[in-house]
Amino acid sequence: MIFLFILIFGVLFLFMNVRNVAPGIKGSIIAGLTIVVLSVCLKLRTSYIASLGMSFFSVWLCEALFLYILWWIARGIRRVVVKKPIDRRIVISVSRLLLFVSIVMTIVFVAIGVGNNENFKVREFKVAVPTEREFTAVFFSDLHIDPLFSREKMERIVHVSDSLHPDFVLFGGDFSDVVDSTLSAWEYDFLVQKLAATAKVAAIAVNGNHEGFLEHKGNNFKGWMQDNGFIVLEDSTVCTPLACVTGRNDHNVAKIREVERKPLFDLRPPTDAAKIPWLLLDHQPRGIEPEHPGRRPDFAMSGHTHNGQFFPGTVIINWVWRLAYGLGELDQIKWLVSSGVDSWGPPVRIGSETEVWFLRFVPVAP
């Protein structure tokens, strides 16, 4: 709902400003055509051409909003100081300049950011947990498979995981922006099977908010992933000899299904598993219930934020989340927030990087 409000506000705000690039009806036509093309791309975004258009417009929308908001702030300050409106010719000239600058910024961001998005990093981190045996996990999130997603990238993810020989493969939600039948038609089922097979103990996944968005289209994320070798946890816990893993239902999935998320206390490992680590997967890094009593997970993992993806999101994101990216702590739990292995919408990264994490879980030092 908040995203929809922001989108509607942004589109209307841009219409008001873009119409100033030309006097009279000409400006309104230019602004109207921009909104029409954006709407068509949004409606047909599952096609390759529309996805390209939507990607360009998404980046432009962000950069143009940023510039025009600064312009309105400057106009407001001037109005307070000078106490008279700006000459109409100046408004038209500045509007044209800002439109030109925003388009140039978009072209530069796309030209640089596509390569940054494609070339994901493999990050390694050592996690101290109460365990007697070391074990490893490959963790990643936010694939967002769509018409612009590179199949070769998925093949590289499988290759990386296979070369690391992890005990666990952990996926943190937002697998795709197309339904499961499309994924099978594009033959991603075979790649997911190969990925699951790289885990020596288990491949485990949770849903994300985009799995929720696709449910009304008949998408069966859980069934499709389980058919291809993954355990999908929806407010449930699975225990192995190395660790217990709890997966939460995403907040948006729970809302769409009109169910309450189970309290984390109800998902805690059984008492006979008290001496092995407890890991938590939750797509959105909101932390846990403040009233949660007793034992807390030893380590938690999330995605969702994309670390802002590109400017100005990379700045704003830190105002939205307590922990927007990286290793930190939420509610007295060691927490890792990944920027994701791909991007939503435009496959563009500026000021953030795509990544896969290789986690080594080692005993706590005595």
Image (cartoon, rainbow, N blue to C red):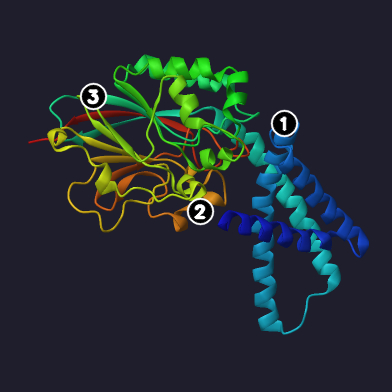
State the residue position of label 3: 135
Q: Position of residue 65 (x, y in %)?
A: 67, 57
Instruction: Give the mark toward the camera: 1 or 3.
Output: 1
Circle 3 sits in a helix, a strand or a loop, which is it? strand
Q: Residue at x 11, y 35 (%)?
A: 365
Q: Residue at x 64, y 41 (%)?
A: 109
Tell me which label, 2 or 1, sits earlier in the chain: 1
Circle 1 sits in a helix, a strand or a loop, which is it? loop
Give the image quarter of residue 291. bottom left
State the residue position of label 2: 315
Instruction: Give the mark toward the camera: 3 or 2.
Output: 3
Three-letter residue code for mark 2: Val
Circle 2 sits in a helix, a strand or a loop, which is it? helix
Residue reaching furthest bottom? Answer: 83
13 left or right, relative to 214: right
Q: Residue at x 73, y 61 (%)?
A: 12
One can see residue 107 in this view? no
Residue reaching furthest front? Answer: 258
State the residue position of label 1: 47
Q: Please rate how many residues cluster around mark 2, counting C-alpha atoms within 10 Å: few if below 14, some from 14 to 19, many from 20.
A: some
Find the distance from the CA under tag 3 to the CA under tag 2. Answer: 35 Å
Query: Does 119 appear above or below 265?
Result: above
Query: Does 247 appear above or below 166?
Result: below
- Looking at the image, do the residues carrying marks 2 and 1 touch, with CB atoms under 8 Å apart? no
Give the image quarter of residue 273. top left
Tell me which label, 3 or 2, sits earlier in the chain: 3
